[in-house]
Image (spheres, rainbow, N blue to C red):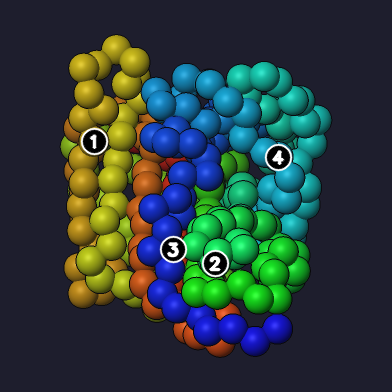
Amino acid sequence: MKFKIILLTFTILYSLQTNAHKRWFLPNEFSVSEKQWISIDASLSNNIFYADRPWTLDGIQVIHPNLRASTISNPQYGKRKNTFEVYLEDTGTTKVASISNIYFAQFEYSVQMNEVKRIRSFDYNELISQIPENAKNIKLSKSISRLETYLTLGAPSSAVFKATGSGLELLPITHPNDVYENEAAQFKFLVDGKPQKNIKVSLVWEGTRYRNDESEITFITNEQGIVTFTPDKPGAYLLEASYKGKSPDTDKFENLHMSYMATLEVLPQ
C-alpha cells in the first residue's frame, strides 16, 4: 500500500495510560548489603506511589551487574497494582526496565471520506494492516517509553548504564543509588545515544496525597544533556523526562515521542 506520510500531531499521543496517571516501580529496598529478594510494585496513579491501576509486567527486563539478563520472578496480578520480585546475588547495580514501543495512525476513511479514525498498536505491521487501502491523509507516529528503577547490592556499579542508542535514556553522572539530600547530583540524558539539550526533567517527592500540589521540581538539560539538582528531602522520588522531535526513520514516521520515568531514592545525610 502506498500513501503519503505527514506530520502527526496527535493530542492523544500519550494519553494511552489515561490522563494524568503516572507509571512507577516501587522497590521495598533500593540498596542492600546482603544477597536477598527485592519486591517491586508496578502501578499507575495520580498520587505517585499510591497504587491505583496495575502496570503490565509483560516484557520487563532485569539486567544484572555483569550484564546478564533475566526475567522477573513470582509475579502477582492485582486490581490496583502488580507485584514481582528480583533476586540480587551479584555485587553491584541491577537495572529493572519496562520498555514499550507504541505505534499510532490517524487517517480519513468513510463513504464521504470525511471521517477521521485513530488507531494504535504495539506492532507496526499490525497497525499498517488495519489501514484501509483507500485511506487518505494518513498520519503515523511512534512512541518509545522507558520505566526503570535501580537496585544495588554492596557497592554501586555502572555497567548497566551503557546506552542502547535507542530512545530517551539516562546516563547518570551521580549514581542513582548514591543521591543524598542537600548534595548536588547530576544526570545526563541521551536521545538515540547522543546528549540532548532542552529536555524537560521533573522530580516529584513521595507523599503527594498529603500535599495541596505535587511540588514538582523541573529542570532543563544543558548543551551536554546534563541537569544538576539538589534534593532537600530524603525518600523516594519519581523522575520523569520527555522528548518530542522528528524521527530518523522518516520512511515510516515523521513524529517521535520519547519518555523516561524512573524511581530513585534520596538518602538522608
Q: Which residue is mark 4?
A: 57
Please provide percent x and percent y for residue 76: 76, 25
Q: Nearer the viewer, mark 1 or mark 2?
A: 2
Q: Nearer the viewer, mark 3 or mark 4?
A: 3
For the residue carrying disc 2, how many other residues have a C-alpha within 10 Å: few (<14), some (14-19), or many (20+)? few
**Front-most of 195 and 92?**
195
Q: What's the residue type where badge 4 is placed?
A: Leu
Instruction: Relative to 85, say whether 65 is above or below.
Output: below
Q: Which residue is mark 1?
A: 216
Please provide percent x and percent y for residue 204: 31, 34
**Front-most of 243 and 132?**
132
Say what secondary structure mark 1 lies in: loop
Q: CA distance from mark 1 to mark 2?
A: 44 Å
Please provide percent x and percent y for residue 212: 21, 17
Say what secondary structure mark 2 lies in: loop
Residues under numbered marks 4 and 1 in contact, where contact means CB atoms less than 8 Å apart: no
Q: CA distance from mark 3 to mark 2?
A: 28 Å
Q: What's the residue type where badge 3 is placed?
A: His
First reached walking from the N terminus: tag 3 or tag 2: 2
First reached walking from the N terminus: tag 4 or tag 2: 4
Residue farthest along the top direction in this orientation? 210
For the residue carrying disc 4, how many other residues have a C-alpha within 10 Å: few (<14), some (14-19), or many (20+)? some
Identified at 58% across, 25% down, the residue is 53
Q: CA distance from mark 3 to mark 4?
A: 22 Å
Q: CA distance from mark 4 to mark 2?
A: 40 Å
Q: What's the residue type where badge 1 is placed?
A: Glu
Say what secondary structure mark 3 lies in: strand
Q: Which mark is residue 113?
A: 2
Q: Which residue is mark 3?
A: 257
Q: Is residue 6 left or right of residue 76?
A: left
Identified at 41% across, 26% down, the residue is 46
First reached walking from the N terminus: tag 1 or tag 2: 2
